Image (tube, coloured by chain):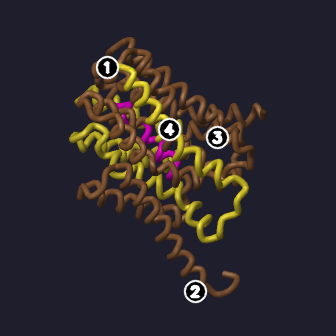
Amino acid sequence: MNNNSFISGLKAGISIAIGYFPVALTFGLLAKTTGLSIWEATAMSIFVYAGAAQYMSLTLIAKGVDPILIVLNTFVVNIRHFLMTAALNEKMQSEKRWIKGIYAFGITDESFSVLATQKESKIATPFAFGVALIAYSSWVVFTAVGHVIGANLPAFLQAAMSIALYAMFVGLLVPSMRGNRKVVMLALVAAVINGFFYWTGLLSTGWSILVATLASSIFIEIIYAKHEKNLPKGA
Amino acid sequence: MGTWYWWTLLGMALATYIPRAFPLTFLEGKELPPVVSGVLRNIPYAVLGALIFPAILYVQQDHLLFGLIGTVVAFSLAFLFSNVMVVVLGTIGVLAVYSLIF
């Protein structure tokens, strides 16, 4: 294994680990109040590892919803990852399928964003393992910690840290936007469409992100294809 | 929780793992048509736009000003430093001070 790119992966994943800390802590706490034992709560973070879906499952468990519906809901919330991992595949170093199957488990909105915005044209497998491992460790460990201490961070810190993952997304997006109008348009159009679905309430969050992303990516691709055709040769 | 919990967990684990693993393993070594790979290359930036907005405004539910300050600080720091860690810690720092004062 290439140690250097593994370590760089760990480093690139630190901001995810920081962002997961308050979210996982609160999940552990909520799981406890929902009646899950520490092992049940931590096992969910170990085996499922999906923030939004785990939070929703707590609400559904508390309401006594049919387990089949909980599983279906999880699938719906995570369907957007089909799109993300298909996109990521274009950027990943060619690798044995079973190895890709291992780090695939660690692909979340956050680790995808970190990986997909790397400047290198191809990402080394150990780098992906590094990013995935540090993010996953933070999620699992702080779920357990949240359950054990059964309390949240001081309110001001909890509030301030709720911005962490979004600040990270901004920090990943903006440098790519510099001098690249296509990137600006892609993000802007997706944001507007997602905002439309959010405020009209037409789609739930998972679907909304999926549709907004796909629509923006296709729309901008068509515009740029036309634009390039109209340019004089060599321009 | 009873045995049903562990079966639910298994179902949730599969429902999460399949969308993550299927494209990465199935598409390995496959050459996609240029149009498709063009669209796929756009996905990361579109996803970021959709992940950020409008959720960033609602990190403290209806306390819109909080989210708005966070948005402005995060974008300003990102334009100035283009270092993710500076953006994350700086935004947390500013909002921590803001929550302490107000």
Task: Please state if A114 lies on the left or on the right of B12 as rendered.
Answer: right
Classify 10 Å Cα crowding around label 4: few (below 14), some (14-19), many (20 and above). Answer: some
Q: Which of marks 1 and 2 is nearer the N terminus?
A: 1
Classify 10 Å Cα crowding around label 1: few (below 14), some (14-19), many (20 and above). Answer: few
Depicted B70 relative to depicted A55: above or below: below
**Circle 3 residue:** A101
Residue B85 in picture, x, y percent from top left: 53, 36
> Quadrant where the N terminus of chain B lies?
top left
Circles 1 and 3, Cβ within 8 Å, touching? The answer is: no
Depicted B8 relative to depicted A141: above or below: below
Q: Which of marks 3 and 2 is in front?
A: 3
The type of residue carrying mark 4 is: Leu
Q: Colour of chain B?
A: yellow
Residue B95 in picture, x, y percent from top left: 34, 34
Q: Which mark is residue A154?
A: 1
* Count of marks overlaid on the render: 4
Q: Which mark is residue B14?
A: 4
Q: Residue at x 39, y 33 (%)?
A: A54
The type of residue carrying mark 3 is: Gly
Can I make out residue A153 in this image?
no
Q: Read off the magenta span.
A: A160-174
Residue A103 in picture, x, y percent from top left: 63, 38
Can I make out residue B47 in this image?
yes
Classify 10 Å Cα crowding around label 3: few (below 14), some (14-19), many (20 and above). Answer: many
Q: Colour of chain A?
A: brown
Q: Is A173 in the magenta?
A: yes
